[in-house]
Amino acid sequence: MKLHREGYTIMAVTAIVLIMINLGINYLLPDGYWIPRLTLIASVVIFFLVVQFFRVPTRVVRQSDREIVAPCDGKVVVIEEVVETEYFKGPRRQISIFMSPLNVHVNWNPISGVIQYFKYHPGLYLVAWHPKSSTENERTTVVIRNKEGIEVLFRQIAGAAARRIRWYVKEGDKVEQSTEMGFIKFGSRVDLYIPLDAEINVNLQDKTVGSVTVLATLK
């Protein structure tokens, strides 16, 4: 396991602030006993939590032309037929995955292909499970077309706490399934829109492992 580059600045600043707080308390309370120790324990816990936000585990990833893999770690919270209005402008199957602050926050490409469409949308910061978060929150929309001409759309969606979306793709890029495409700091949600005839391989409340779990199989 390694740490993601998106966390380097935050981890460094957190470490400096915590060190300064501990030095200050030890200076102000040189004869104290439990307060400096309690502060030190709390600082270690806080720093550990911040570090775990940016972990990047080593995984044996999946690559298959017929499979759509999970773009993130989390829990399946939506599986339903909807009308996608931004790109397809028609019916698609939506699969939504909620990322908690304890999940790995890396995002991966769900299929191999070429980026046909990319757009960043500024917006609100509603809680990630709010029904309107998919259309009103800060988000990105990415469409990948595979070699068979099948397109899959997915969105990185910011939540109430996750206000930092990062992406490393642009229109015209050729991407490989299960490779890193972005990062959402401190968790949030990812929505996928797939063909109606794709076979769904997950159920509501299932836990997903990004770049590994097969969400659906293409016809």
Image (cartoon, rainbow, N blue to C red):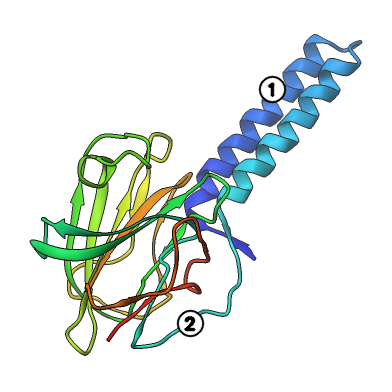
Expressed as whole percent of the image width and height from the top left, the position of residue 5 reads 50, 57
Label disc, if present, on residue 62 of the rendered structure: 2
| Callout in the foreground (2, 1) | 2
Q: How far from the left and from the top, in percent, is residue 158? A: 34, 44
Q: Quadrant of residue 83 in the image? A: bottom left
Residue matched to label 1: 21
Q: Quadrant of the N terminus?
A: bottom right
Measuring from the top left, give residue 117's x and y in whole percent: 15, 67
Question: Residue at (34%, 86%) from the top-left corner?
Answer: 66
Q: Is residue 202 left or right of residue 17?
A: left
Residue occupying image coordinates x 32% and y 34%: 126
Q: Secondary structure at mark 1?
A: helix
Q: CA distance from mark 2 to mark 1?
A: 45 Å
Question: In the picture, residue 201 is in which quadrant?
Answer: bottom left
Q: Is residue 192 left or right of residue 28?
A: left
Residue 131 tag number:
none
The amino acid beneath tag 1 is Ile
Q: Are marks 2 and 1 in contact (CB under 8 Å)?
A: no
Q: Amino acid at mark 2?
A: Arg
In x, y percent, where is residue 175?
31, 78
